[in-house]
């Protein structure tokens, strides 16, 4: 029977300066940053909603969104000012729903530091934004609630 190791577990078996495991790789402190947004009814395509903020060093673990029906054809990207869909691409807010958002990932990445989605680590305090990729007839007073879950050392 063979034993195989994840990238992180290999760091325990092969000690080196480069092989140190960061606190957020093993767990760290779990934090949640909540948000609530009430649609004005005047939102348009490419408008930005500042949802919340994460601190320097935050490693993204998940995004949860519970939304009412926010209008006809409401599609949203969740990310930051450098990459508007870094975390979530094309979430549908046109129908009431509550779920963990599917975080983006790059299957071609070989580096152990993701450049988007699950596991992405912010190097500075950063606003998490919802960019309205498409909006047609937004619903006034529709509420979106949720949180960004992350780990810090």
Image (cartoon, rainbow, N blue to C red):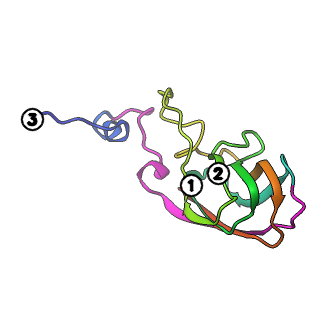
**Relative to 112, residue 47 above or below:** below
Q: Which residue is mark 1?
A: 101
Which one is nearer the viewer's eye here, 109 or 141?
Answer: 141
Left or right side of 70 for 99: left
Which one is nearer the viewer's eye here, 16 or 63?
Answer: 63
SS under mark 2: strand
**Relative to 106, residue 130 above or below:** below
Which mark is on residue 91?
2
State which quadrant residue 69 falls in: bottom right
SS under mark 1: loop
SS under mark 3: loop
Foreground disc of the pair 1, 2: 2
Q: Is residue 29 magenta?
A: yes
Estimate the spatial distance between the alpha carbons at disc 1 and disc 2, rounded to whole Å: 8 Å
Left or right side of 61 for 15: left
1 and 2 marks in contact (CB < 8 Å): yes
Residue at point 84%, 48% (across, down): 45
Quarter of the image with the N terminus in it: top left
Q: Which residue is mark 3?
A: 1
Magenta region, residue range: 15-43
Residue at point 80%, 66% (across, down): 139
**Position in image of residue 56 (x %, y %):** 66, 51
Left or right side of 83 for 148: left
Disc with the residue nearer the chain's start (2 vs 3) = 3
Q: Is residue 54 visible?
A: yes
């Amino acid at each position: 029977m063979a034993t195989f190791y994840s990238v992180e577990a290999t760091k325990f078996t092969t000690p080196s300066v480069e092989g140190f495991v960061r606190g957020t790789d093993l767990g760290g402190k779990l934090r949640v940053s909540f948000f609530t947004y009430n649609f004005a009814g005047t939102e348009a395509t490419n408008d930005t909603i500042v949802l919340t903020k994460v601190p320097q060093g935050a490693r993204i673990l998940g995004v949860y969104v519970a939304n009412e029906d926010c209008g006809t054809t409401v599609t949203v990207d969740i990310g930051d000012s450098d990459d508007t869909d870094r975390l979530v691409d094309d979430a549908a807010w046109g129908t009431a729903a509550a779920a963990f958002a599917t975080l983006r990932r790059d299957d071609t990445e070989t580096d152990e530091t993701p450049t988007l989605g699950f596991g992405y680590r912010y190097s500075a305090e950063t606003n998490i934004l919802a960019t309205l990729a498409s909006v047609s007839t937004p619903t006034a007073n529709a509420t979106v609630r949720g949180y960004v879950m992350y780990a810090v050392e």
